């Protein structure tokens, strides 16, 4: 039986194998293994790609977020407003910096933080808003920045799923005070290990992060702040430099596959395809549909050899380490409903016409056979809602 994975990193590797191997080899021959030529060049290339002033390579996306907070002196006693419908790392980074996450509900059409619900969450302790450009769709940044300006708050983009995404023609990375990117292997720009990047137009944030990622080291034996070990490594940077050259085209391929899925599933009443706001250039880190029949559809697709994912089945505010931060079950209704209904379909640049057709055809078949089921025999009432 054929199987279609959720992500196929090997297929992508086939396209760049020779170049990647050459670059890894050249790092090993030079033995310049830490904060060398490749990290330095990637920082310049990635800043240029984002059309931002500075980029600083760090150990991971999580560290990128928490180092930005530390650079801004946001920590104990400060609150940071963010979404709960996200990967747990967004909230972890806030806690790592010593600050307190405050969760706000999402706009159910874009799955990003709902600007209309931000103001009621602001207190005198609020220091920043951290919107997440989830799945590759940018958050509504004008509305968010407007609120931040009125209340004197910082804006930190969690762009870990949004390399190359745009808001009104501006790339993520320069939509707030600073942005965090992850190079975790499955991201749109992924290393073959861990890595991350801070992108900013703010010179002070840039120089503070540069110090913090490397033990506060100003020169060989001079340490001016207590920092940490969070350097992007040379081998990963060399790999990322090869992949960055392809990012724009690969994002375009993701968009083309997404358009194909959306066109073919447009007529299905029980499934909602991703919404692209007029302001958005969506880069489809994940292609996420929603349906109340998620579990049944998911198991049918599994039987047909189509892998799917759920991002994310349990919202952050209902995960054990974050249950103490205010709202329990029922506090974020759109977030909790999305958690029951979202389903990620296979999405990666190396998808083929046959694979995408097989995926959407399997979905169309599922809903067709379900419709033919006689009344009273409906096998699915998943989520139990409505
Ligand atoms: C991947 C991701 C992160 C964290 O990145 P790591 O490099 O894994 O630390 C943070 N936020 C979001 C939304 C992510 O998807």
Image (spheres, grey):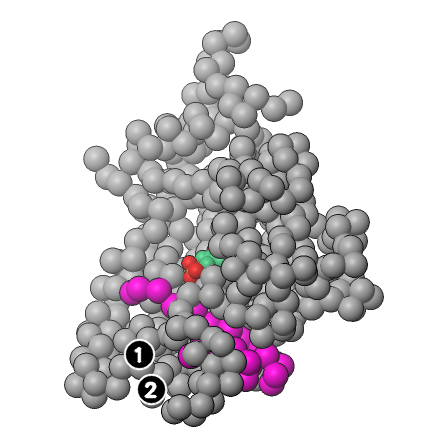
Q: Is residue 364 above or below residue 14?
A: above
Q: Is residue 206 magenta?
A: yes
Is label 1 within 8 A of ligand 1 (CB to nearest ligand atom)? no
Q: Give the Cα separation between the discs numbered 2 and 1.
A: 7 Å
According to the picture, the residue beneath numbered tag 1 turns out to be 234
Q: Is residue 242 above or below residue 336?
A: below
Which image quarter: residue 362? Answer: top left
Name the residue located 51 percent from the left edge and 23 percent from the top edge. 382
- Quadrant where the N terminus is found in the figure: top left
Image coords of residue 85 (percent x, y): 57, 46
Which image quarter: residue 132? Answer: bottom right
Q: Residues within 10 Å of mark 2 (few under 14, many from 20)?
A: some
In the drawing, does residue 307 fall left or right of residue 173?
left
According to the picture, the residue beneath numbered tag 2 turns out to be 36
Q: Is residue 289 above or below residue 45?
A: above
In the drawing, does residue 307 fall left or right of residue 259?
left
Q: Are marks 2 and 1 in contact (CB under 8 Å)?
A: yes
Which image quarter: residue 339? Answer: top right
Magenta segment boundaries in residue numbering: 192-214
């Amino acid at each position: 039986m054929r199987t279609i994975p959720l992500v196929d990193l090997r297929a992508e590797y086939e396209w760049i194998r020779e170049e990647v191997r050459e670059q890894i080899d050249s790092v090993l021959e030079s033995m310049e293994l830490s904060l060398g030529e490749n990290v330095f060049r990637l920082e310049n290339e990635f800043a240029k790609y984002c059309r931002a002033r500075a980029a600083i390579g760090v150990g991971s996306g999580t560290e990128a977020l928490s180092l930005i907070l530390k650079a801004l002196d946001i920590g104990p006693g400060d609150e940071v407003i963010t979404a709960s419908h996200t990967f747990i790392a967004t909230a972890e980074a806030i806690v790592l910096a010593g600050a307190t996450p405050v969760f706000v509900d999402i706009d159910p059409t874009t799955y990003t933080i709902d600007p209309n619900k931000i103001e009621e969450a602001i207190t005198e302790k609020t220091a920043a808003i951290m919107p997440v450009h989830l799945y590759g769709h940018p958050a509504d940044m004008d509305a968010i920045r407007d609120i931040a300006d009125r209340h004197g708050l910082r804006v930190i983009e969690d762009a870990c799923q949004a390399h190359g995404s745009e808001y009104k023609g501006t790339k993520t990375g320069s939509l707030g005070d600073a942005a965090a990117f992850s190079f975790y292997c499955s991201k749109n720009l992924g290393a073959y290990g861990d890595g991350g990047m801070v992108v900013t137009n703010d010179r002070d944030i840039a120089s503070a992060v540069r110090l913090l990622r490397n033990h506060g080291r100003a020169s060989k034996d001079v340490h001016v702040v207590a920092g940490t070990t969070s350097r992007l490594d040379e081998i990963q940077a060399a790999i990322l430099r090869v992949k960055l050259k392809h990012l724009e085209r690969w994002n375009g391929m993701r968009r083309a596959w997404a358009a194909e899925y959306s066109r073919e599933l447009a007529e299905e009443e029980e499934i909602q395809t991703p919404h692209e706001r007029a302001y958005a250039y969506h880069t489809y880190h994940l292609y996420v549909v929603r349906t109340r029949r998620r579990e049944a559809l998911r198991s049918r697709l599994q039987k047909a050899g189509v892998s799917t994912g759920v991002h994310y089945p349990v919202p952050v505010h209902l995960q054990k380490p974050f249950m103490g931060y205010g709202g329990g079950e029922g506090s974020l209704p759109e977030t909790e409903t999305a958690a029951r209904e979202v389903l990620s379909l296979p999405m990666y640049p190396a998808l083929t016409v046959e694979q995408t057709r097989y995926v959407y055809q399997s979905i169309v078949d599922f809903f067709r056979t379900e419709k033919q089921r006689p009344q009273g025999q409906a096998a699915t009432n998943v989520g139990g809602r409505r």
